[in-house]
Amino acid sequence: MSPFHISRRGFLRASAVISAGAALPAWFEAQAADAPRPRVPLSPNDRPAIALIGCGGMGRGDAKNASRFGDIVALCDVDATRLEAAGKDYPNAKRYSDFRECVQHPGLHVVINGTPDHWHTFINLTAIKAGKDIYSEKPLTLCIDEGKRLVKAVRAAGTVLQTGSQQRSDKRFRLAIELVRNGRLGALKHITSSIPMGQHGGPFASSPVPAGFDWNTWQGQTVSVPYVKERGHGSFRYWWDYSAGTLTDWGAHHNDIAIWGTGLPLAEAGPVAIGGHGLRDPVPGGYSFPSTFFVSYRYANGVTHTCRTVQTEGPGGNVIDPKTPPGQMPNGVLFEGNDGWVFVSRGTIVASDPAILQEPLTNKTWSAYDSNDHMGNFFDCLRSRKAPAAEAEIGHRSVSVCHLGAIAIRLGRPLHWDPVKQQFPGDKEANGWLTREQRKEFSYAALGI
Ligand SMILES: NC(=O)c1ccc[n+]([C@@H]2O[C@H](COP(=O)([O-])OP(=O)(O)OC[C@H]3O[C@@H](n4cnc5c(N)ncnc54)[C@H](O)[C@@H]3O)[C@@H](O)[C@H]2O)c1
């Protein structure tokens, strides 16, 4: 029986038994302790030179995390205020406003891409061309065609690219996937990814562009509109033009876990049927992606998958909130099989029966990639030249699941998808959404990529 069908008290009882203090089973901890540790640099000369492009909250967090392994030598942003603020953390780093100049910084090894979604691919392709390795924030792309291009370019250049889908290096998520893929739940039937609601609001008025902010460049390939604060820093993700709401924002995390759990080979990882709709109409002139939505998927192996917004979020959106009404799950991913269920989120893993977690997995046929430190794994791969835990194709395939849901919402009808050819068979209208119209000034051709 799934937690959607059991009482709130029953679910909490299971949680209390299995996940109090969010402790992991001893057998899994012992296995994780054997995992290779990221290599610690041996000398000052061994520290890679890093550029941060996009100095917002996430970019700066990534830069701080990366500075355990290398040196931040360059910073780039199109907002002078943000550049200056980041410069206080790294006073010796050279400051740039143009990412094309930044990737040419002498002696540079690594680019951290912390820009908004609509800039990720352009900057990643430019960095690849300049011979740099990349830690790029998720969602990796703005549309599926960008992902295809990126994967091709990464392969051709031998680039190490880590997608910022850090749940791939989180022990709880890895445990959940090992249980699912080694048959602990019996045959996998259904996956639910519950993600936070987006923003609903508007209409919003335009205002003068803040001093030092290059709004034209910030908009990049997207349609040029007068400056509206709510379209810019941080809240860009709630607009179709720059993203697809929390479907691509949180979906890039939880749908990544979902497709990992399906067990499909990466080159076939994607649904064959998709349906979806928004649950609340956006306000004209306001945030344009629906704040709440429901998307359903079916995979070629018969597994079904629902991705939906959580109607009532717990504090922080990630934790089991005792106030969550019966029948509603907190933010996370639920796997249901013939023999039970497991629910995993950040800091929490619970199952329908304690034995599902506590019994060691003997005779495993499949093991999750050994990484407990997502940034550390990236720097380790710089030296080994192995594929990192969330390599480019993983980032591309995961966000493609989200893009497919967004296209179904946009078109308001069911869709059929060929995950191998990465096309909607015989559906010209839907195939038209695999790309986005680019402003001439910021097209691939104009930027030479
Ligand atoms: N991995 C995670 O858990 C996680 C969490 C939060 C955000 N993110 C991702 O990180 C990215 C950034 O999110 P944020 O909340 O920090 O956004 P933000 O809007 O606060 O910051 C983005 C920064 O990039 C700059 N920028 C835009 N275009 C640029 C360009 N062409 N060149 C240089 N700089 C440019 C902006 O001026 C801004 O300072 C998003 O894609 C988001 O999805 C990931």
Image (spheres, rainbow, N blue to C red):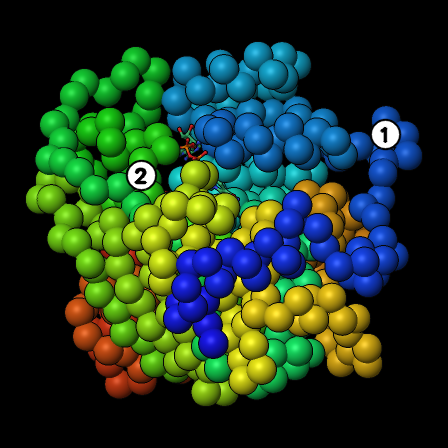
Left-right relation of 51 to 333: right
Q: Does residue 78 appear anywhere in the picture?
A: yes
Which residue is identified by label 1?
45
- The image quadrant where one finds ligand 1 is top left
Instruction: Looking at the picture, tell me which residue is in the foreground, 305 or 272.
Output: 305
302 vs 190: above or below? below
- In x, y percent, where is residue 342? 57, 67
Q: Residue at x 46, y 58 (%)?
A: 9
Left-right relation of 245 to 349: left
- Determine whether the beta carbon of the residue marked 2 sits less than 8 angstroms from the nearest atom of ligand 1: yes
Left-right relation of 246 to 39: left
Label 2 secondary element:
helix
- In x, y percent, where is residue 93? 63, 19
Instruction: Find residue 379 and name its label.
Output: none
Q: Are marks 1 and 2 in contact (CB under 8 Å)?
A: no
Q: Quadrant of residue 376?
A: top right
Q: Does residue 349 appear anywhere in the picture?
A: no
Label 1 secondary element:
helix
Residue pushed farthest right?
42
Q: Residues within 10 Å of mark 1 (few under 14, many from 20)?
A: few
Q: Residue at x 60, y 47 (%)?
A: 347
Instruction: Find residue 236 and name its label.
Output: 2
Q: Amino acid at mark 2?
A: Phe
Q: Amino acid at mark 1?
A: Asn
218 vs 24: above or below? above
- In x, y percent, where is residue 139? 45, 51
Q: Quadrant of residue 36?
A: bottom right
Q: Residue at x 57, y 12 (%)?
A: 88
